[in-house]
Image (cartoon, grey):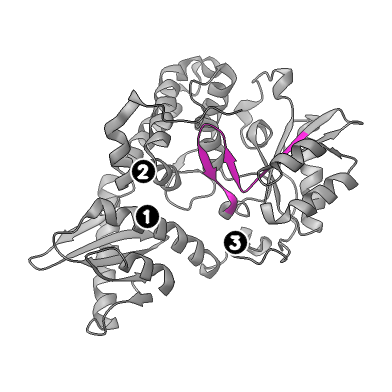
Amino acid sequence: MEAILKDINAVIGVTGSFVTDGAGRLLARALPEVFDAQTLELVARNLVQTYSGLEATRRRKVGDIDLVFSDGRLVAKRVGDGLVCILSVKKMNVPLLNLTANVAVRRLNEKLKPAAAPSKKDVRLATTTEAAPASAPTAEAAPASAPAVPDIPRIQEAQAIIRVARERKVLLRAMGDTAIRMRCPSAAGIAVPPEEDYLQLAGHRRQAGDVEKLLKEQGCTPDPQFNVLYGGQRLRFVHSAKKLFIEVVLDELTSFHRLEFGPRLHLDEWTLTPADLFLCQVQVVHPGGIDRQRTLALLSDFEIGGAGELRAIDGGLVSSVCGEDWGWYKTVTMNLAEADAAAGTFQGGRSAENIQTRVRRLTGVIEEAPKSLRWQVRSRVGERQTWYEVPE
């Protein structure tokens, strides 16, 4: 963690930084020796209590705390249950600081996950991170049972492949339409056009060879030309006997926007996290009817949660992605506005109130989140320049 703090300290004007847990205990520091640990922990405990009080009063997540003094400045950012605190000169370029610090926060969150007290689910799951050696197997224990899902062939096939992959220590998870149907009961009535009736899985780039070997053993035939050209990003297969097309997306989805999901791939037992499923869905610019329906299903069936929540759409992750990149921000907020307007058309309006409440909450979280310097510069250009890529 000290190496991550040193990246923050490299920003001009920063005096030093430190990380604490939710009780204010010092976990790491990169500060001059004049700052003693006891004082740092006292400051952290007061800040943690301040966050708790503000969140209880406002009933929502609080962003950064920026305290300005006569001869300096203290910026506090949430890291899991704890904080990263940054000391700097008074006249600090805060947007420039956020550009580096927000990346550091995400890295610190990943570092702190293995150190957290294990939940019942964590006992079943062994974690893997991007920093793992390329040859290291991904260890995870088998869950007690698969989730109850619709009797759809590609969903049953997804579960079967993930089970086998788990036994082989290969990390695979469902994504796309298949995953949304596995997680969202309200998606059952969404009709799928033939061209979208395929199985999409997510895996790690470093395990691409293991994935190909595993799927071949399951009776799948690789698309050699596509896999040679694009194998660093995606792999494609056909299961002729089951008439099923399979695509495996490796570490990141590159479409209208780029979403790096690899560091979070292990967090759920069967699919990408709800936040990643949501981001994969709302990165579509000018979505068609089925894309909008899938977005509405996710908002209907999942609450908007705080940072790190796995049984809800993690508002911290969504707002962080949108706060780093104005293009992401523009597309997501457009999709949220459309979801708000279309909520009454989904399932005869039965979920309209829930959807609209969640849309407004998530929009508020996005708007209140700190924005990077790159975001601020790009926002001045606005829609005069295309803010998204056109997928092939």
Q: In the rendered structure, which disc, 3 or 1, sits on the residue that comes first in sequence? A: 1
Q: Identify the image quadrant of residue 288.
A: top right
Tag 1 and tag 2, C-beta contact below 8 Å: yes
Label 3 environment density (alpha carbons within 10 Å; few <14, some 14–19, many ≥20): some
Q: Considering depth in this image, is 125 or 58 the residue closer to the camera?
A: 125
- In terms of secondary structure, where does tag 2 sit? helix
- In terms of secondary structure, where does tag 3 sit? loop
Q: Residue at x 32, y 47 (%)?
A: 372
Find disc 1 in the rendering and name its residue. Answer: 102
Residue 253 in picture, x, y percent from top left:
59, 40
Q: Which residue type carries mark 1?
A: Asn
Q: Is residue 55 magenta?
A: no
Q: Magenta segment range?
A: 246-262
Q: Quadrant of the N terminus?
A: bottom left
- In terms of secondary structure, where does tag 1 sit? helix
Calculate the distance from the C-alpha at mark 2 to the C-alpha at mark 3: 24 Å
